[in-house]
Amino acid sequence: MQDIKSYLNDELGTRYSPGEISYLTRLILERGLSIPLTDILACKFNHLSDVAVRKVHEIAGRLKQGEPIQYILGETDFFGLTFSVDSSVLIPRPETEELVQWIINTTIDGAVKILDIGTGSGCIAVTLAKKLPMAEVHAWDVSSAALEVARKNAERNGVHLIFSERDVLQDPVPEVKFDIVVSNPPYVTASEKEDMEEHVLKFEPHLALFVPDDDPLLFYRKIADVAGLNLKRGGSLFFEINREKGEQVEVLLRQKGFRSIERLKDISGNDRMVRAVRE
Ligand code: GLN
């Protein structure tokens, strides 16, 4: 039988020795092979079945092709919760956790009505529903495959959301009044493609990443209009933004009649989030 510890150490370049375990190794053993963490830490997995060994080889093969571990395992963590992911949704990013934290910090009355436009895996909407249990959370997406993932994530995390399959650029928008509208829309332009990491380009859904017609503000304009109609007075619009477009998004929101516009940087120091209040 293959010595799985040396396999992980040598072949995968991950590290395994008691007391020193890489996060990737832990993910493979704990989530890929369902070995309890206590056994992993105690080094108690010398006798893996052939099935388990085959599974490690399969995971290793896919990692070597550059596939993100989150897609291989079919799940990832976001804001302390676990979310299913597949290639129809973006892998939730830590910057988006910061956006969610900002919304939670600024929401004093928890009995709010929230709309998440372009929900993808549902990471924003599900987390808000979980952390603000009095809130009513609606989530839209153009992709039925993404909505299926988001539904699974709502169920997995024990929250009830109101989902709609809707193309915010084309479809009519119902008039429902919300306290908060949030969106992390596609914001990468074609010219930024060459700076992107290969695994993102190769494995993540381009529908969720790239703006159509290379118009970086397309979704922001449209969603600002939706929020202008559907936010209650004094309600807030939150956006995740392209770090190069903070100023432009701010100007756009001012033109659309929003006030108290604030921009926040993410932990890497990049312009990443905007909040604007409806008059
Ligand atoms: N932040 C993501 C990336 O860097 C893009 C997310 C988005 O387009 N909304 O790949």
Image: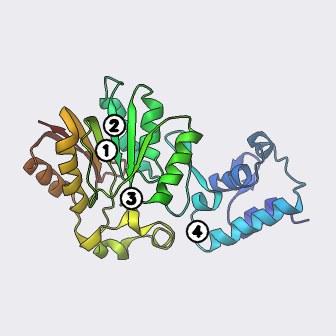
Q: Earlier in the sequence, mark 1 or mark 3?
A: 3
Q: Nearer the viewer, mark 1 or mark 3?
A: 3
SS state under label 2: strand
Mark 4 Cα-neighbour bin, 10 Å: few <14, some 14–19, many ≥20? some
Image quarter for ligand 1 equals bottom left
The residue indicated by pointer 4 is 67
Q: Earlier in the sequence, mark 3 or mark 4?
A: 4
Kind of residue at disc 3:
Val
Front residue (pair 168, 57): 168
Q: Quadrant of residue 48?
A: bottom right
Q: CA distance from mark 1 to mark 3?
A: 15 Å
Front residue (pair 166, 78): 166
Q: Nearer the viewer, mark 4 or mark 1?
A: 1
Mark 1 Cα-neighbour bin, 10 Å: few <14, some 14–19, many ≥20? many
Q: CA distance from mark 4 to mark 1?
A: 29 Å
Q: Nearer the viewer, mark 2 or mark 1?
A: 2
Asked if marks 3 and 2 touch (Cβ < 8 Å), the reply is no
Q: Nearer the viewer, mark 2 or mark 4?
A: 2
The residue indicated by pointer 1 is 182
Q: Is residue 1 left or right of residue 32?
A: right
Asked if marks 1 and 3 touch (Cβ < 8 Å), the reply is no
Kind of residue at disc 2:
Ile
SS state under label 3: loop
Front residue (pair 114, 206): 114
Residue 99: image x %, image y %?
Answer: 35, 43
SS state under label 4: loop
The residue indicated by pointer 3 is 142
The residue indicated by pointer 2 is 114
Q: Earlier in the sequence, mark 3 or mark 2?
A: 2
Q: CA distance from mark 3 to mark 2?
A: 18 Å
| Rendered residue at 21%/56% (across/down) | 222
The reply to whether the residue tagged 3 has its Cβ within 8 angstroms of ligand 1 is no
